[in-house]
Image (cartoon, rainbow, N blue to C red):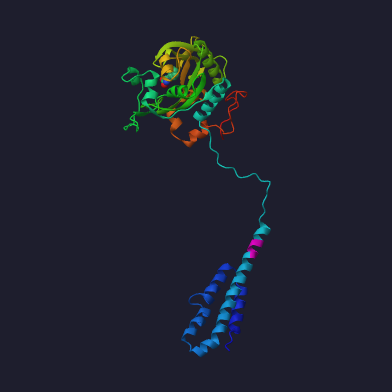
Amino acid sequence: MADYSVLENEARERIGAAADLSALEALRIEFLGKQGSVSGLLKSLGAMSPEERLAKAPAIQALREAVANALAARKEAMEAAELEARLATETLDLSLPAPELPKGSVHPVSQVMDELAEIFADLGFSVATGPEIEGEWHNFTALNMPESHPARAMHDTFYFPDAAPDGRKMLLRTHTSPVQVRTMMSAGAPLRIIAPGRVYRSDSDATHTPMFHQVEGLVIDRDIHLGHLKWTLETFLKAFFEREDIVLRLRPSYFPFTEPSVEVDVGFALVNGKRVLGGSGDAPGHGWMELLGSGMVNRRVIEMSGLDPDQWQGFAFGVGVDRLAMLKYGMDDLRAFFDGDVRWLKHYGFSFLDQPTLSAGVGAQRTHAP
Ligand code: PHE
């Protein structure tokens, strides 16, 4: 019988002496690769006579197996030694602080909306919502702006080219006032809601963006009057701006959905060229800033919303949320709100841990996000 023990011993010796994994891989190729010496022996079987092949094949197969096993054993030993070495040198300090994760920040508009919800929740208001894609009826008609009413021209409306399946003309809501109608229809009276959200008008410059934010307020009950409106706005603005000296001036105005309608101005002082709310606008160095529209809900709107205007009445108001944010936190370009510039967001954004609370004075404890 053929004896390959010399070959086998030599292979074992060289495998045992291999310095590292790449040297070992070179040996595997040398012995068992396509052109390898052991592979060559296996191939030579094909050229032998059947008798010779029968005599030599078992020993060659055994050689191949012995070399393969020796390679595998050596490889395992090397890997185990490597792991041992790493375990011996590397240490893991479990008392080290965890690596810091990148943190996002809360956009000032979201922050202000949370502040508004907090302030009005304390006055018994809940938050209502409505769709941003509206029908003409909710956005205009039910708010006492019938077809061809000149007040529709007050809004530069984005209309959709196609009508809804039921034939309604669709648009991007131009104000949050349609939520008044929707909530009266779905929840009935009495009612105290605010409705913050996005609104759209075809308008664009430093102080106007085609998309902006409003918050609508609506109170419906049996004996609500203008005094309730004024007190509510005063209480809200004092809590929001965290100043007791907020002074309001109510001016007669016109909105189709309120009667009477009042435009509300707030007194401000010029401090280092910046407008700071507080004090009467008639005081020296002061002025009045137009802040919001409001009024007693027009009885036609109450009627079109399915309520009896002889039983139910109330007030409504609408304020720009972005405007409130700018006045409170001192940004001066509205367009930057929606540019998505991370540097702006980092500077003006808020930590998600800073939940506005009335007891802390909404906004008072605020630390800007890192
Ligand atoms: N919807 C009005 C606007 O967008 C604001 C408003 C709301 C006025 C409610 C009166 C009452 O200009």
Q: Give x and y (percent) for residue 215.
A: 47, 23
Q: Nearer the viewer, residue 189 or 157?
A: 189
Q: Is residue 315 above or below residue 187?
A: above
Q: Is residue 128 above or below residue 7?
A: above
Q: Which residue occupies 56% across, 23% down?
A: 121
Q: Nearer the viewer, residue 41 or 175?
A: 175
Q: Is residue 2 above or below residue 178?
A: below
Instruction: Look at the image and tell me whether residue 316 can be seen.
Output: yes
Q: Which residue occupies 57% across, 15% down?
A: 244
Q: Which residue occupies 44% across, 22% down?
A: 181
Q: Is residue 134 left or right of residue 246?
A: left
Magenta stretch: helix, strand or loop mostly: helix
**Image quadrant in which the C terminus is located:** top right
Q: Which residue occupies 57% across, 74% down?
A: 68
Residue 364 painted magenta:
no
Q: Nearer the viewer, residue 230 or 148?
A: 148
Instruction: Look at the image and tell me whether residue 298 can be seen.
Output: no
**Which segment did they paint magenta?**
80-84
